[in-house]
Amino acid sequence: MTIRGVLFDFAGTLFSAEPKVDDLAGITDVEGNELTPDAFGELVRKVISPVHGVALDGEFAHAWQNRDLDPELHRKAFVEAIRRAGVVAEEHATVLYERMIDTSGWTPFDDVPEVFQLLAERDIPIAVVSNIGFDIRPAFTATGVDQHVTEYVLSYEHGVVKPDRRIFEIALKAIGVEAEHALMVGDSQHADGGALALGMRFSLVPPTAPEERPTALRDALAAHGL
């Protein structure tokens, strides 16, 4: 089948959340030392997978489970996870959360502009489908690739998260493409691979650092004839 539309995941697929060094200015660890990029990386690993590093219970467990459905729950869950991680001073948890979701500190993977341009030249619409609790559009605008995005389908705006088939159906309808003519590209077999249930094609990109996958998106498209 000919691919007539492509859906992309956001974090870990198109953009990498790597804060600039000065984004951490004024943030200290529990010993009062300025937070380093390495320590920030450790913190991020803990808060994105609290079952492995940070235990959340009660109302915070509920907030975490539903974080991508509501911005306030997203904030509540992450601020508490940051606080409990014990990496930064407690009074800096909210400040650090704000810096974590500031998309000006997020950078696109190297092959994003090339891949988006390629699809645009072939009149193939793009939908960005993300489980997220905040607006990611500024990241695309800041890097100049927003002109190629036909639709953003964000979980908190539609009340549904991947791998639920409904979020893919919303995206397909938005770009006017049937499932059998669409490709989903993402870094999660579970979440992004949910597209397979609709009869879409799926390409898994490795969840690695940008320098370790310079052509992953190009390869993902090439594997399906694009």
Image (cartoon, helix red, strand yellow):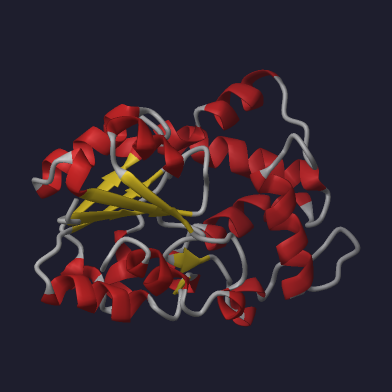
**Place of residue 36 in the rendered image (x, y in percent of width and height, measured from the top left):** 77, 74
Position of residue 195 relative to residue 90, above or below, is above
Asked if residue 214 can be seen in this view, the reply is yes
Looking at this view, is 117 or 138 the one in front? Answer: 117
At horizontal 65% and vertical 72% (from top left) the residue drawn is: 24
Check the image and name the residue furthest to the front: 1
Q: 55 left or right of 113?
A: right
172 relative to 30 in the view: left or right: left
Q: Is residue 26 above or below residue 211?
A: above
Q: Residue at x 31, y 61 (%)?
A: 224
Q: Is residue 14 above or below residue 151?
A: below
For the C terminus, the quadrant is: bottom left
Judge by depth and name the residue closer to the eye, 127 or 132.
127
- Can you give x and y, in whole percent of width and height, for residue 223 in the image? 37, 64
Q: With 211 as the anchor, is 35 left or right in this view?
A: right
Residue at 57%, 61% (x, y): give it.
Answer: 206
Q: Residue furthest top?
A: 58
Q: Nearer the viewer, residue 141 or 9?
A: 9
Total marks placed: 0
**What percent of the width, then of the height, locates residue 158?**
27, 33
Instruction: Please tell me in which quadrant of the rendered image residue 40 appears.
Output: bottom right
Q: Is residue 143 visible?
A: no
Residue beneath the point at 12% across and 77% down = 121
**Residue lying furthest right in this view?**
31
The image quadrant that residue 78 belongs to is top right
